[in-house]
Amino acid sequence: MTSAPLASEGPYGYLMVHFLEDAEGYAEKIYLDLSEGDDPERWVPLNGGEPILASHLSTTGVRDPHLSYNPQTGTYFVLATDLRVFGGDDAGWAGWSRGYSTRMNVWESRDLITWSPLRQIDVARDASGAPAEGAPEMGMMWAAETTFVPDFHGLGQGAFVVYWTSTVGDHQVILWGTTTDFTQATWTFGGILLDQGDDTIDTTMIQRDGRTYRVTKDNGATARGLFMEVTDAERWWEPEAQWRQVQTRIGDEYAAGHGVEGPTMFKAHGEDRWYLYVDVIPSIGYRPMVSTDLDADSPWNPLESDRFSLRASTKHGGVLGLTRDQHEALRAADAASPVEADLGRVEVPVGVTPERIRAQLPGTAEATLHGGGTASFPVRWEMSGVDASGVGELRVEGVLQGTIGANLNAWRGRGGSTAWDAPEKTPYSATSLTVSAVVAVV
C-alpha cells in the first residue's frame, strides 16, 4: 500500500526561468522569478532582480532559457541559446542564424538553488565530438525545449527529447535529439521534427492524458503567427506522427504592431486551467493567455486579470511547477544581506594551522531575505594567505553558502576586461554575500 504524499510534497507554486531584453546593457543572462505563493499570475524576481547565472563561454550570451527535470535522477537542468545580441559579436541576425553556434548552454542542480558551473554541448555533433550522423548542415541552435519520455530507452530508462530551431537550407525548421543528462556523451541527433518548407521557429509543448499539444511560431508566408497543433501519437517526435492544427494567430491581441513569439505553456495546480505566455517582441516581453479546455476549437484567449504581475521585458523562458517544500526553500535561500557583516573576534595560538583557525570561526551567519524574515547560512571562510606564524591580528572573509545569489552570475577576462571576446574569462558571483571576522594570533 502506498501512503498518501505529505502536504509539503504536493504541488504548490511555480518557478520561471527567463532572460531580459536590454539594448543598453548586458541582460542576456539567466533570471529566476518565483510565484507569489501558489499564484501562477503573480511573479517575484529572485536575487533582488539580479541574474542567477551567466555564460563566460563562446558568445557570452544566454537567451531563450528552459527548465527541465529528470524524475528518474532527481536532476534539474537549465538550457539556453548561445547568443549575445547586445554587446557581443556584431554579425547580425543573418550571420547568427545561418553560420553561428550550434552549442547549447547547460547548468544543472539538485535543488534549484545551487547550480553547477556552465557547460556546453554541441547539438550538431555526436558523443565523440564528430559531426552527427544524419544531421543536416544547420545554422545556430536556438530556443531549445524538452519533453521527458520515461521509457524512451526501455522500461524505466527515460530520456529527454530535445527540440530546437535551426536554419537548414533556405529556411528555419524544428530539429530534435535525445539525451539523458545534457552531456555530449549521451547526446544523439534525432532528425527533423517540423519542416513546413518555410520559416518555423520556437516550439513549446505540453501533454495531457496521452495527448501532446504544441504551439509554434510561423514566420513564413502563410502568416499563421503562433499556431497550436495536437497529436495522439505515442511517439510524437517521429515523422509518422500525425498532427492536427487547432488554432492560429494566438496572442495577436497583444501584438499591436509588434511580433509575438517565444511561447511557453504550463498547467495550473489542481484545476483544468492552462497558461500560455507569449513573448511580445522586441522588448515588451511575456503576456498571458489562458485556457480551460485544450481541446476546444480555439482554446487560447488573453487573460483578463488586473492581478497579473511580471516585471517588464521578461523574455522567452519557461515555467516549472514546484512543491511547497521547494517553494519555501527557494524563498529561504533568497538572501539579501548579512544581518551582521562583522562576526567578531577569535583568539588562536601562534603557529596554528588554517584548518584549526577555520574551526574556531563561526560556522553560520544570519541573513535577511528579500521576501522578509531571516535565515541561517553556512559560511565558507577564505584561508588562503592567512599566516599565523607570528603574533598579530588578521581579518578574514567568508562567503555565505546556499544562497540564490552565490551562483556564478558574472565573469571577468584578462586584466579585468568585460569584452565579450576577452581572453581568459573567469566566472564568479557578483551577488554572493560576505562576512568578516578578526583572528587574533596570541
Image: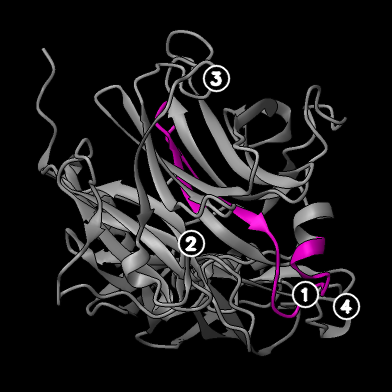
- Would you name the residue on which mark 1 appears? 88
Q: Of 354 and 86, which appears nearest the observer?
A: 86
Q: Is residue 109 visible?
A: no
Q: Amino acid at mark 4?
A: Arg
Q: CA distance from mark 1 to mark 4?
A: 17 Å
Secondary element at tag 2: strand
Q: Horizontal and vertical percent for residue 358?
A: 56, 68
Residue 316 is marked as 2
Check whether the beta carbons of the residues at disc 2 and disc 3 lie within 8 A of each other. no
Say which label, 1 or 2, has the lower sequence index.
1
Say which label, 4 or 2, has the lower sequence index.
2
Residue found at x 60% / y 27%: 178
Q: Is residue 40 left or right of residue 154?
A: left
* Magenta stretch bounds: 66-95
Secondary element at tag 1: loop
Q: Is residue 152 above or below residue 372?
A: above
Q: Of 268 and 13, which appears nearest the observer?
A: 268
Q: Is residue 306 left or right of residue 354?
A: left
Camera-near label (3 vs 1) is 3
Secondary element at tag 4: helix
Residue found at x 14% / y 71%: 305
Magenta-drawn stretch contains 85: yes
The picture quadrant where one finds residue 272 is top left
Camera-near label (2 vs 3) is 3
Residue found at x 22% / y 55%: 290
Q: Horizontal and vertical percent for residue 121?
A: 72, 42
Q: Amino acid at mark 1?
A: Gly
Q: Amino acid at mark 2?
A: His
- Would you name the residue on which mark 4 appears? 414
Q: Is residue 103 left or right of residue 176?
A: right
- Would you name the residue on which mark 3 appears? 238
Q: Is residue 200 above or below residue 132?
A: below
